[in-house]
Image (cartoon, rainbow, N blue to C red):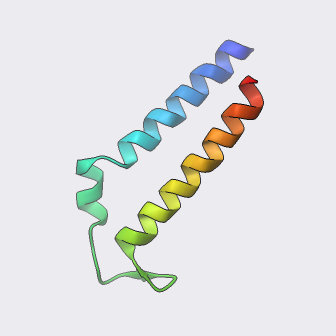
Amino acid sequence: MKNKRARLLFAVGGLLVLAAIWPTLELVNRIRPFVLGFPFFVFYMVALNFLVFLFLLIAFRTLD
């Protein structure tokens, strides 16, 4: 059971890293579409940081 959780957490972490590297950022690097008053790129980075925080919180609680 713990091995499955660790593998799942590793996969989600890998997806979050892929979402923050160069090719993906080229797709969201736009000024025009505003989300909550922010340019889309800024909103994307804030949302990604929040997801990383949630992921680390879940990983800390489940693998502790």
Residue 43 left/right relative to 29: right
Q: Residue at x 23, y 49 (%)?
A: 23
* Quadrant of the drawing holding the N terminus: top right
Residue at position x 36%, y 49% from top?
20
Relative height, residue 40 to residue 19 (above, below):
below
21 is higher (above) or lower (below) than 7: below
Up the image or down, 1 lies above or below 50; here it is above
Q: Nearer the viewer, residue 24 or 62?
A: 62
Relative image position of residue 28 (x, y in whole percent): 31, 65
Which residue does the image show at 27% across and 67% down from the upper left? 29
Of the pair 8 and 47, the residue shown nearer to us:
47
Q: Quadrant of residue 34?
A: bottom left
Q: Is residue 57 left or right of residue 13?
A: right
Count of picture labels: 0
Residue 5 locus on image (x, y percent)? 67, 23
**Image location of residue 48, percent across then percent down:** 49, 55
Percent from the top left, x then y, of residue 3? 66, 13
User: Which quadrant: the C terminus?
Assistant: top right
Instruction: Identify the residue at image location x=51%, y=29%.
Output: 11
In the depicted structure, whether residue 36 falls above or below residue 54: below
